[in-house]
Amino acid sequence: MFTFLRENRNFRNFWFGQVISQIGDRIHTLAVIWLVYTWTKSGTSLGLVLIAATLPSVLISPWAGALSDRLNRKHIAIGCDLIRSLLVIILAVLAHGKLLNMPLIVVMTALISIASAFFNPATLAMLPSIVSSQDLGRANAITQLSANASGALGFLLGSGLIAAIGVPSAFLFNGISFCVSALLIKTISYQHSPSPKSLSFVADLKEGWQVVQSISVVSRIIGPLIVVNFLFSSLSVLIPIFGEGVFKSGSAGVGLLLASYTCGMFLAALVLSTVQLKTTISRLVTSSLLLVGGSFLAMGCIERLPLFVVALILIGFALNGANICLITMFQRVIPGEVRGKFFSMLTAVSLSAQPLAFGVTGWFADLVNPAGILLFCGITLLGCALFIYRIAELREQSV
């Protein structure tokens, strides 16, 4: 990995910028979750803030992806980083002055989500132009490896910062991290090849959806991906509820649980960045979902902090391994001139159920035993594994 980074200056700068901003972003996420739950003790309130963090991105992603195919993706990424930095620094100032409240958190979270909606498809579509085709899978694994390592580190650092210094410092760190990311992206040598500007945005969106439908392996897996994302998203609401409401472990316990599944993601990326698996996408995704479903069932049956830590590590490991392989497959089969539209459409479709999951999970968590939600998710995930195993096209795709 270090040799690869040393030999590719563009990718190295891109990678390092993402590491810094992702650490800050996880600290920020923990600060928001901790602040809202300690204020309200309500799953519904947590769900509302998480909806604000995802719904704008889902709605805007198709247009954002079309824009990334028209305009310079490097410029879009820099602009989004600077906008997010400004918004987060404003949050830090408001928190320091004790002027922050739930409506302000919801609004600022939504604005940050909008900026991220433009940043994500631009960088995903830019990566194949920074590294060679044969190095693309490795670059994706390294990117995920660093994202997960910095994510786990960010949650752990965030719990310490919140306990020692307070929420405003966590917001300020994130604001600075976005500035560093923008400066590093600016150093990347990147040539953009725009799609024809004669197309309207409506035509761009239609073309993106036609790309999804035209590739059988993509169109058949979209439905299961929506369900899996819905079920996995319930953890964002349930982790603080179990960490503080059930285990009484404070910000350190919530940070540990959030770090656990990102640690699992890190381990999956580490394996894929160093080992060439000889299997099919079908076998890998099916076995991953079986492991995830079993982990959900174990958490629903045994409410113990150590077991949750282990189960969340396994969930992160299984899901990220499948995710890296699927992203690499998509990058290989989608033409470069429509890649931005495809990834923005894929993001919007696959994550479309996520805001609904936050709302439904938060509402049910206030009405029923949260362990029952985990059991339902586990059983449904096992069903998804069996459905994906029956998709013949995935058996033709190697990892």
Image: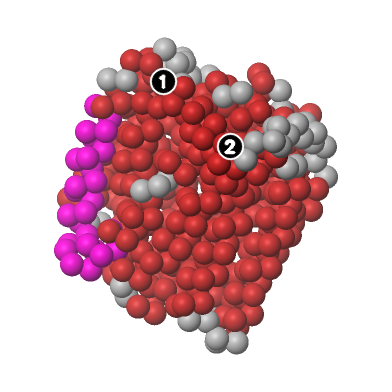
Q: Nearer the viewer, residue 270 or 9?
A: 9
Image spot of residue 117 (x, y percent): 57, 51
Mark 1, residues whose alpha carbon is within 10 Å: few (<14), some, or many (≥20)?
Answer: few
Q: Secondary structure at mark 2?
A: helix
For label 2, the residue is 204
**Could you tell me what secondary structure mostly forms the magenta stretch?**
helix
Quadrant where the N terminus is found in the figure: top right
* Region in magenta: 361-386
Query: Please, is residue 397 above or below residue 292 in the view?
Result: above
Q: Is residue 154 left or right of residue 58?
A: right
What mark, if any, has residue 216 been given in the picture? Answer: 1
Q: Residue at position x 31%, y 46% from top?
A: 231
Q: Residue at position x 83%, y 45% from top?
A: 187
**Is residue 198 in the magenta section?**
no
Image spot of residue 120 (x, y percent): 60, 46
Q: Is residue 66 visible?
A: no
Q: Is residue 287 visible?
A: yes
Query: Please, is residue 75 above or below residue 49 in the view?
Result: above
Tag 1: amino acid: Ser
Q: Nearer the viewer, residue 207 or 171?
A: 207
Q: Is residue 254 left or right of residue 161?
A: left
Tag 2: amino acid: Asp
- Which circle's residue, 2 or 1, is located before the other in the chain? 2
Q: Residue at position x 38%, y 55% from top?
A: 355
Q: Gap in Å between the C-alphas at discs 2 and 1?
A: 20 Å
Image spot of residue 176 (x, y percent): 70, 64
What mark, if any, has residue 141 been given in the picture? Answer: none
